[in-house]
Image: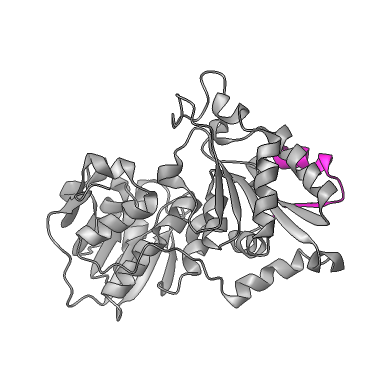
Amino acid sequence: METLIVRANKRLPREGIREILIRGTNWIGDAVMTLPAVAAIRRTWPQAQISILAKPWVADIYRESKDVDRILNFEDPGRHQGPFGKIRLAGELRQFHFDMAILLQNAIEAAIIARLAGIPVRAGYNSDARGWLLTHSVHRTPAIRKIHQIDYYLEMVKALGCNSAGRNLHLDLRPDTCSLADAWLTAPESKHQLIIGIAPGAAYGPAKRWPVDRFAAVAAEIISEYPATIILFGSKQDEDVTDAIATTIQGHCLNLAGKTSVREVMALIDRCHAFITNDSGLMHVAGALNVPTIAIFGSTNPVTTSPPGERNIIIRKPVDCSPCLKTVCPTDFRCMNLIGIEEVLAAVRQAIKT
């Protein structure tokens, strides 16, 4: 790693900071990867009240963090959408009298809202042409594109003068969150069986998705080898994929795509003995929960977005066109097609033994 990754125009004040607003990121995986940066902010201002402004679908990630005191929902779509919605949100934020805003999200919108809310200290990357809206601006050097996303956020707060709390990322669920899994795992045999999670979707696009028939073949082989229950995870947009897998292993799975909250998903993943996934937000959740994770990479780069934790097996073929970071493969999808069923099964067997 190069010595200079980012640089700030000045460091954040240490004194007189009582109320801090952190603008969270908009995707589940990104939210997980910001948690070490949030911990660094907490360590630097231990007595401050820390609030997170986040979209509802990622708010539950931050809600599990012991470093966060308050969650504020950014409802867009909803009452905060459009220009007047942003003005409404800024007015709501003004009532908290924030001393400082640290913007983990990169968009200019985050800086505009913080400015409209009258927050005197506004810090973040100078991305999206928003540097003039920030009082404490962090410039990214070319080296920033070569580091893991966890370090991307950590380097920003470090440049602003925060005390690092380390980059280790472990998500400790609250007891009331853990108990949410009980309602789904009602069968008596589930207490004695292996529970294998599978997340066959990926929101970014089909280039990140290993073929569904191969996921189905892996699931069927697991069922034939082990007394196992398969849990299929995903959003409503993944239902066609999870339905295809569920048809292959009828009676041996819980197909929960589109049926669970983020808190329920975290609780259920925490019960899994292994988790098979594309590069997705749930991959990061599983890694942060220290669940053995088999992560299948194609168009994206594990150097920058590999799952956190130390119980991960990354499966990737180093073809010359990967990582392309494209949503749809323009050629022959070789990065994914070269990954065989038996290779993934071998990784599952290894994960189960650990």
Q: Is residue 125 left or right of residue 192?
A: left
Q: Quadrant of residue 146?
A: top left
Q: Is residue 129 above or below residue 93?
A: above
Q: Position of residue 213 (x, y in %)?
A: 73, 33
Q: Is residue 50 left or right of residue 205?
A: left
The residue nearer to you, when weighing 47 against 84, is 47
Q: Is residue 219 left or right of residue 310?
A: right
Q: Is residue 162 above or below residue 347?
A: below
Q: Is residue 46 above or below residue 266?
A: below
Q: Quadrant of residue 114?
A: bottom left
Any magenta on residue 323? Answer: no
Any magenta on residue 252? Answer: yes
**Could you tell me which residue is drawn at 17 percent across and 77 percent down?**
15
The residue nearer to you, when weighing 59 against 84, is 59
Q: Position of residue 156 (x, y in %)?
A: 26, 55
Outermost residue, bottom side: 47
Outermost residue, left side: 9
Q: Position of residue 109 (x, y in %)?
A: 31, 48
* Colour setup of the view: one colour
Q: Position of residue 96 (x, y in %)?
A: 32, 72
Q: Quadrant of residue 271?
A: bottom right
**Could you tell me which residue is drawn at 62 percent across and 35 percent down?**
210
Looking at the rendered image, the quarter that the C terminus falls into is bottom right
The residue nearer to you, when weighing 164 against 123, is 164
Residue 63 visible in the snapshot: yes
Q: Is residue 99 above or below residue 346?
A: below
Residue 92 visible in the snapshot: no
Which residues are the magenta region? 240-259
**Could you tell me which residue is drawn at 52 percent across and 26 percent down?**
328
Outermost residue, top side: 331
The residue nearer to you, when weighing 151 against 73, is 151
